[in-house]
Amino acid sequence: MPCIRGLQQQQQRREGRERSKEVSAYGEFTTVMSEERYLVEGLTAMGYRVEVHAEGAALVGYHGDERPETAHVIIRRAQLDSASNDVGFVRGKDGRYQAILSEYDRSIGYGNQWLGKVHQHYKESQTLAVAKSKGYIFRGKEVIQTANGPQIRLQFVAR
Amino acid sequence: MQQETITVVIDPNGESSVDLEGFAGQGCDKVLKDFQGDDHAKVQRKKAAFYSSAVDSRNQHLKSGQ
């Protein structure tokens, strides 16, 4: 019997060591929009037709006047409100895209909440593409309604 | 062995979280980095499961008087 007990103890110690090697981790991140492809995919998923200008193009105001601001990714005002200006995303020197939104457009629903949604779609598009390129297997997508709007949950397994 | 799963949750404001389960050793950090991409990290930590497994093991020994 002592022999069996010894083996059981050994087994328990081994299992304990093996379990302690299993690491679970958690991270929280702020989305940085730095890739044109995912920005375009995200805006398209939101239902917009976007223009892409490698060198940037002028934004047009609600009177049809050309504004001094230029942007690399543009949603033309015809797709927004009748009194809207173009919405643009300009790539900064740090490679990050920043939105150009008029005060009027911010006040009619293209403010921070809308920008959050743009970031959400960007992140979804980027996550799916990166996971695929790195060989992770997509297991599914769930959209959960929260008080602040829909939350997207993506699940993958390692190959 | 537990399956290695990755759950990415993207909030309506564009903030995201990545939750890893069942990974071993340094691989864990690489996977987290893969899913972080260019994003700015706000929180990164090993989860309690890692530490509690060692404690559970010790408690079992104490309970059984071994």
Image (cartoon, rainbow, N blue to C red):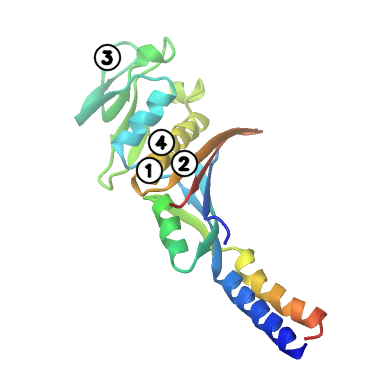
Label for residue A125? 4
Amino acid bearing label 4? Ser
Mark 2 neighbour class, 10 Å CA radius: few under 14, some 14 to 19, many 20 or more: some
The three-letter amino acid code for the residue at tag 3 is Asp
Please report the residue visible at 66 percent of the width from the left and 33 percent of the height from the top. Answer: A147
Asked if both marks, 4 and 3, belong to the same chain, the answer given is yes
Give above or below for B49 relative to A3: above
On the same chain, marks 2 and 1? The answer is yes
The image shows a total of numbered marks equal to: 4
What x and y, as percent, mark residue B19?
55, 53
* Marks 2/1: CA–CA distance: 8 Å
- Estimate the spatial distance between the alpha carbons at disc 4 and disc 2, rounded to whole Å: 13 Å
Percent position of residue B15, x then y: 51, 44
Q: Which residue is disc 1 drawn over?
A: A132
The residue under label 2 is: A138
Which quarter of the picture shows residue B48?
A: bottom right
Nearest to the observer: residue A113 or residue A46: A46
Residue bearing mark 3: A65
